[in-house]
Image (tube, rainbow, N blue to C red):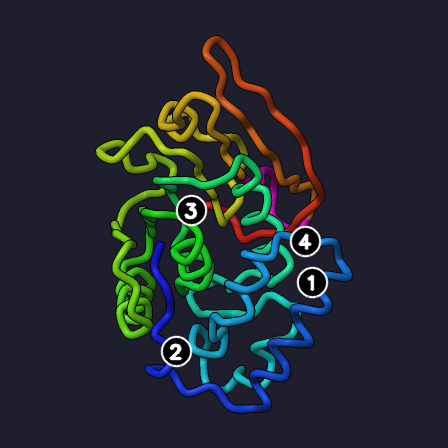
Amino acid sequence: MSSISAHRIETSPQQRREADRLIELLQRQGISNPAVLEAIRRTPRHFFIDEALASHAYANNALPIGQGQTISQPYIVARMTEILLSRGKLDAVLEVGTGCGYQTAILAQLVRRVYSVELLASLSEQAQTRLGLLGFTNVKFKHSDGKWGWSENAPYDAILVTAAPQTVPEPLLEQLALNASLIIPVGPQRSGQVLYKITRFRNRYEQEPLEAVSFVPLR
């Protein structure tokens, strides 16, 4: 696990108050893992979005980050992370869809090693720069098609996917360790997407639908 070098990124008193209010809202929405809440509290979400949107950084909404992609709603980030950590401490986690790097930063504070794959090179490069400035040293990045995962570092204790495929990519299932879970939204954009937790056992996979969600498609 790594921690944020908070002194490197300026956060105003107003932004800190807004972050505190966001944490209170997430708690009212059922997020209860104190480590997840604290990671969200101390991660400067305004640093991951365009300056023109900074006044909305701590609202509980998804926001555009360019190229048809978004930074996920804080509730969804918290919910997926809390589910991922339900087994306890994790060593190696694969993130499919680095995006702006916000979810990556949350994970990096809570697990030992994060491997993050992103199809769009410019987003991957920006995320690497941001996490470097924040002082993270436990994240590795790859510019690649996320549906293939990152087999060189498998098996993973968990895999988290931040965009929605139409069907679950088989390589991601194969890269799970035994008793590990894949947290993934599945379905068409704008209608019918469901967040699933899929756990690998020795002779089978167990699929649990969690809730309706709305993600950009996995490209």
Q: Which residue is mark 4?
A: 32
Q: Residue furthest left?
A: 152
Q: Residues within 10 Å of mark 4 (few under 14, many from 20)?
A: some
Q: Extreme top residue here? A: 203
**Mark 1, residues whose alpha carbon is within 10 Å: few (<14), some, or many (≥20)?**
many
Which mark lies nearer to you, 3 or 4?
4
Task: Tell me which label, 3 or 1, sits earlier in the chain.
Answer: 1
Taking the spot 50% from the left edge, 63% from the top edge, the residue there is 39
Res. 73 image quadrant: bottom right
Label placed on residue 219: 3
Query: Which is nearer the N-term, disc 1 or disc 2?
Result: 2
Label 1, label 2: how many angstroms apart (C-alpha)? 22 Å
The spot of residue 29 in percent (x, y) is: 75, 58
Residue at point 59%, 65% (across, down): 62
40 over 9 or under it: above or below: above
- Residue 148 occupies quadrant: top left
The three-letter amino acid code for the residue at tag 1 is Leu
Q: Which mark identifies residue 176?
A: none
Residue position marked by numbered label 2 in the rendering = 6
- Choose mark 2 or mark 3, whichever is in front: 2
> What's under tag 4, amino acid-wise?
Ser
Q: Position of residue 193 (x, y in %)?
A: 65, 42
Q: Which mark is residue 26?
A: 1
In this rendering, the label closer to the viewer, 3 or 1: 1
Q: What quarter of the picture does the N terminus occupy?
A: bottom left
Front tag of 1 and 2: 2
Secondary element under disc 3, as helix, strand or loop, is loop
In the image, is residue 15 above or below residue 45?
below
Region rendered in magenta: 184-190
